[in-house]
Image: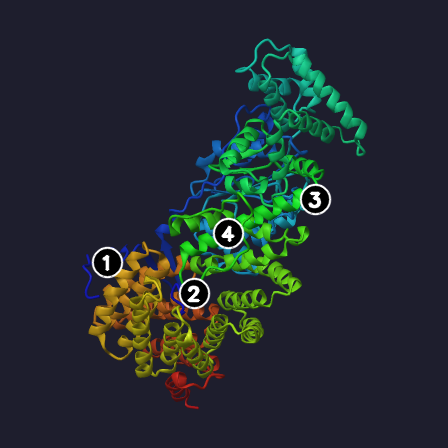
Amino acid sequence: MSAAPGEGERPGRGDDQPVSSVLSGSAANAVVAGAIEGGIHFHDAERHERRPQQVPRPIGFFVNQERALGELAESSIITANGEFKNSIVLITGTAGVGKTSLAVRWAHENSALFPDGQLYLNMRGFDHAEPVAPLDALNRVLPALGVPATAIPDDLDAAAGRLRTELADRRMLILLDNVASVSQVRPLLSGHARCMLLTTSRNNLAGLVSRDGARRIELALFSPDHAVLLLRSLLSRFRAGDDEEDLSELASLCARLPLALRVAAERAIERPRDSLIDLVHELRTESSLWQSLSTDDNEESDSIRAVFTWSYRALALQTARTFRMLGLHPGQEISTGAAAALVGITPAAARTELDRLVGAHMIESVARGRYQFHDLLHAYALDQVADEPTSELIGAVNREMAWYAHSAANAVAAVQRLFAAPVLDPLPADCAPAVFGSRDAAIEWYQAERANLRSISGVGAQYGLRRWTWQLAIALAPIHHATRSSFRDWLVMAQHALEAARADGEAVAVAMLLTTRAVVFSEQTPRRLDDAARDLEVALTIWREVGDPTGEVRALNALGWAALRCRRLDEATAYFDQVHVIGERLPSGPWAAVGLENACLAYYELGDLTTAADLITRGLAALTDLVARGSYPADPRLEFDMRIWLTRVQRGLGLVDQAVTTVVRVGELAAQQGGEPGYLMWAQLEQGHLQLAAGDPRAARASLLDAVRACRAVGDQALEAEALTAIGDTYRVLGDNIQAQSFYLTAALGYASAQEPWHEAQARAKLARCLTAEGQVDAARAEWRIARELIAEFDDTGIAALRRELDNALGE
């Protein structure tokens, strides 16, 4: 398929007012064009409406943190220059002392200090799994700030720089919980002190203090009085008459740690008729046992384990089994459905057991139908499940991986139609995957489960479950393309899957993974086209050896796209011709039409618009015939894609009236997709081009500004650069060469980032024409020279006219 996800005069209200858009409402971007060196800055109102509030809800009954709260209050004083007195604050203390509770409550109580929102991320520095890597953290934080996943660089320094850019004019809180090392933190620092970074850690993170100027706030254990006060607060509604001395003893046995105190209090609440002294006696016995088994002389650790064991042994058998089985889950959060599969019970039963564990303070409810462990309790659950028979452990992980693979396949089926559902191994008995009634529901599930999907893909080999490892990656792949999500997570999964498939000798699975990974390499920024070509050549050989024409046509199409992106246009047309020929032999599916469409793109770049028009017309006819014969369901997305290119070819041939008719249908198809930016950007761009061709540059400019905003929402740098170039054209028509220069320069830089030097050369040529018109001959000559260097390696007919212009301008 092509890159798409994949008229007339509009009523205006004067130059200083937003212009109504039949597709998107209004042009909400105010544009300030600076000098040629400065480029253009867009003030995007929608961007500043993003005020994420990600901090979890606080716990009740908060005591004994007056000193720490005072230090936080002092740190958050805003100075005369608008900066926080201490913009980096580190809360340290032993495990279970209440660091997260303090940070979360303070964030909620002081939200007014952060009008642009609050970000939260559990860095999992002390969990049994690997800590969250800085680049993974940036991939989770930046989308909340409005950065499309596809626009997040894969280089750590570049991604950190993008975060600083996004925070440049914001006042926000970034709360990083459970940090293990300074290296986890530094890439997430803002570039100014108007944002605050609040971090919790069991470690001192000395480098963050000495080098970055963080203020460290150390949390000590509760005093005996405060520990008793917390117990009384927790117990007062459920028990009466507990003796002060017994409460003090209970607090002592809990090492005066808030986490242990809360777990112990819940145990006492469950037995309101038992005297507290009896409960204290039980816990004292448990504590003595732990001390006798201990080898590390860590009184606090022993006390916590004793409290956990005391509460765990009081659970009903099924609830206790649910608790320990949850320890096998490799992710941070788990849904009711995944928990049901892991434990081997129905979702309704799982909901009951999870709620019981929440009531016992053994797990936490973080959102409707989603739960998580405190890392200490997760480690304890893992200790308990280790005693299960190996067959039980393998069975549990097998059910969870099967649940994720089938749920992923269901999500993909709800999101796209081009790729058929993969053949998966059967589900284990009584395992019910997630089902989705809409595309939005499927995408919401995928976004919530992304981290879990990546984590679960890494545990299959550990339990000998290689088949689910590669089946999960194959099932999930299409949703990354359909949602234009970050490919980083899937590439990690793909590596696990390839290792598993090769170990299993599954040649077809290897070919599918290599084909998909190659497409990902082609879509990444910067693109890895050489890596893509290598994967595809291997995959193509396998597809031909096993006699799978559908796999073959996918690999050929991907090879065509890799060639197209390198501007090897003759090579691209040859691949797309093969896609068309093989697609015609397939009993169903749109590949013949897709081959014609993509060949149209190559001929469009070659400047052969007559051939391009013939190809796209035949492609639309083939698609219409497929649908009419029932060989392929009506697919408005593919029709949209083809009509966009029909519009572009018609416009290029000067058939403006026909293009206007086509773009009306394009707008209808875009509306059917609920205003998704991936569709709006193309529709608005073509509308702007046509308005300019019809002689209405002001209306065109408004449409093109809408297109820029949609491109940025999707992260399509190349299409954004095209829109910016066209905006420059509107200013040239209006006689404003200075504004036009700024847009052409910004477009050229965008094309450079998108690795499209031939289009960058075209933008710089337009910039040079503006400079020439302004009498800036030397500056124009420099731009002509850069443009010629950019196209030096290309000799196709589509670039020939530009090369002649550049040679004439330079007189060489």
Tell me the amino acid under the disc marked 3: Thr
| Residue at mark 2 to residue at mark 4: CA–CA distance | 34 Å
Work out how far the residue at label 1 is from the one at label 4, CA to CA, in angstroms: 40 Å
**Number of numbered callouts drawn:** 4
Q: In front of the other: label 3 or label 2? A: 3
Circle 4: is it few (<14), some (14-19), or many (20+) Cα within 10 Å? many
Label 3 SS: helix
Which mark is first along the chain, 2 or 3? 3
Q: Decide which of tag 4 and tag 3 comes sooner along the chain.
A: 3
CA separation in Å, label 4 and label 3: 24 Å
Q: Is residue 213 visible?
A: no
Question: In front here: 715 or 78?
Answer: 715
Badge 4 amino acid: His
Mark 2 sits on what residue? Answer: 717
x%, y% of residue 596?
37, 76
Type of the residue with mark 1 = Val
Residue 418 is drawn in which quadrant? bottom left
Which of the marked residues, 1 or 4, is nearer the chain's N terminus?
A: 1
- Residue marked by disc 1: 22
